[in-house]
Amino acid sequence: MSTIRIDNVRKSFGGFEVVHGVSLDIADGEFVILVGPSGCGKSTLLRMIAGLESISSGNVVVDDLVINRLPPRERDIAMVFQSYALYPHMTVRRNMAFSLKLAGAPKGDIDRQVQAAAEILDLVSLLERKPAQLSGGQRQRVAMGRAIVRNPKLFLFDEPLSNLDAKLRVQMRSEIKELHQRLRTTTVYVTHDQVEAMTMADRIVVMNAGRIEQAGTPMDLYEKPASLFVAAFIGSPSMNLIHGRIEDSAFLSDAGARIPLAANAPVTSDPVVLGVRPESLHVGGVGPAFGECRLRVVEPMGSETLLAATLLSGGDGAHGGGENIMILSRVKERYAADTTVRVGADPGEFHFFDATSGRRLE
Amino acid sequence: MTATAGLRRAPEIAVSAHRHIDLLTRIVILMVLALLLVFILLPLFWMLKSSFQTNFEVQAIPPVWLPENPSVEPYDLAGQLIPLWRYIANSLYVSTAAAVIAAALSAMAAYVLARFRFPGATLILALILLTQLIPSVTRIFPVYFLIQDMGLLNTFSGMIFAYVGFSIPFAVLLLRGYFQTSCPPELEEAAMMDGCTYFGAFWRVILPVSLPGIAAVTVFTFLNAWNDFLWASLLLSSGEMKTIQVGIGEFATESGVSNYQNAFMAACVISTLPALILFFFVQRWLVGGLTAGAVKT
């Protein structure tokens, strides 16, 4: 187990910089998830930690040792790839034993460690099969087995669940989390799926365009997104964002809806964006008024219902609005499209962002 | 009343018309293929049946299509007239050595060109491609004098050296495509994370995974060398060192084909056997190796 310090790390391909001075400290045994859209630099950062990509400037420090120039084989880091990257000509046993064999471990130790890893991952009955004879989930478990058998300082996962179907992904998510809770090995995990990030991470690092937007616990990011990007990225369905300005203790949307605010709302004359999560909006008479809405589409999902609605007027009843919003209702009620409903919301759950910089306003 | 009662039925004329056209097209295609097959196989059949006939039967007009009294005597005769087995051994040695060396060198070169970006990589690839566009006959004098200046004229080493040189460009192009499409870079990255060096990853993971492609290259180089007449007749003039293709040529001029056509054909059959046996064993890999690089799977 190890700590990692990523200190002002940059990466350029040719003259094009794709990672712009990223700094991050990862504690011993922590499960950190790098999340962001495609091309944000998260996989590049992971590959720099692995040693598969050179570092243009800055340092990657593992346990007080700068590892920038160490080849991957000398870093004692194990990695699970998106495509599993199992050796197709080797059996599961040989795949898992490969690193130990290269390290010159005695045969007895290799057998014992492979058996132990196979038992943890329920692979014992598959040890003599080749990768082509395994299902997607089994291959992913073998890839993890190959990583854990070495007992490395650090685990890296590069979108390991992307190739699995939805059901298997949920199952593997729990297995990876359980594995981490059991081994407590420091883990850096890359995904573009914010649900994966929210459910698995001790800490999420949201990246955008080669920079860290925000790092924090899943609930930190959910409750206090530092920027419009994080607000829109974290949470499913994503946060409603309405452009406007703050005037006389109310939010006046660009389309004219006037929504009453709490006393502690920020005071600014600059354009702002009001963020409100779909699950913070309640259909019916509960809580202070957010506004009148017309329901356009009703999507029942069993335990909850997702409503696509258009804001007709703000909470003070004045005419205006026209913004499209999403409402997540957890009340067991049958809604009908093309009906007008009152929507309530607690102004304390509103988020405000500077419309120009995108940063959070307190 | 069934659920489909009263529903309109789509006309079936279109389907039967399609079937009719399909059948006609199929018959035409089959006839064309049969003609092509006859065109390709007739000389081989002629060679095979002549090798079991008497010389009189071979030269008879109208032709005798099947041996009346099949005999292996022409095979004995071929062995008496020329040192057939010596020539075959020479061919096997030269072709095998050229194939193994060319496959080893081109696999390493192709791997580097497939995986690494370095200044001049595109130029190297362009030059390799260029060699495929130049007619091989234009290389006769430069290569001959090169081999002569190196003191390798009339040696197996010189011959192997030439074959390796001729085979490498095509082999590199083929294997580069194979590495790019059939060996994902994650495989060697995983190997390096597991403790391999670059060469270790190549040796322990990439090479075993690329065996079909490498087999294809090896067989092609072997067959090219085995079937070559031009370079073997130019670079190896000593009687003892002749390859089978050149040896058979000598057979015709020294003994006179008209007198020993059946023995000549028997020698030709024997000369095709090693290549045929090799192809029989590796054809599955060979076809896989040639097509694997063609499409992204």
Image: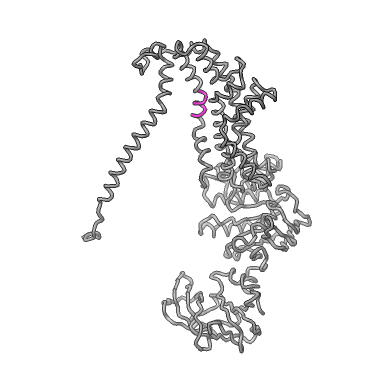
x and y percentages locating residue A212 in the rendered image = 67, 66
- Of residues A355 and B185, the one nearer the viewer is A355
The image quarter containing residue A349 is bottom right
Taking the image as shown, residue B134 lies to the left or right of residue A214, namely: left
- How many marks the image carries: the answer is 0
Q: How is the image coloured?
A: one colour
Residue at 55%, 86% (x, y): give it: A258
Taking the image as shown, residue A7 lies to the left or right of residue A191, namely: right
Residue B277 magenta: yes
Residue B129 drawn above or below residue B59: below
x and y percentages locating residue A281 in the rendered image = 53, 79
Using the rendered image of the protein, determine whether residue A229 is visible from the camera's viewpoint: yes
x and y percentages locating residue B30 in the rendered image = 34, 35
- Of residues B227 and B133, the one nearer the viewer is B133
Magenta region: B273-279
Residue A286 magenta: no
Residue at 35%, 37% (x, y): give it: B29
Residue B176 drawn above or below residue B83: below
Dominant secondary structure (helix, strand or loop) of the stretch shown in magenta: helix
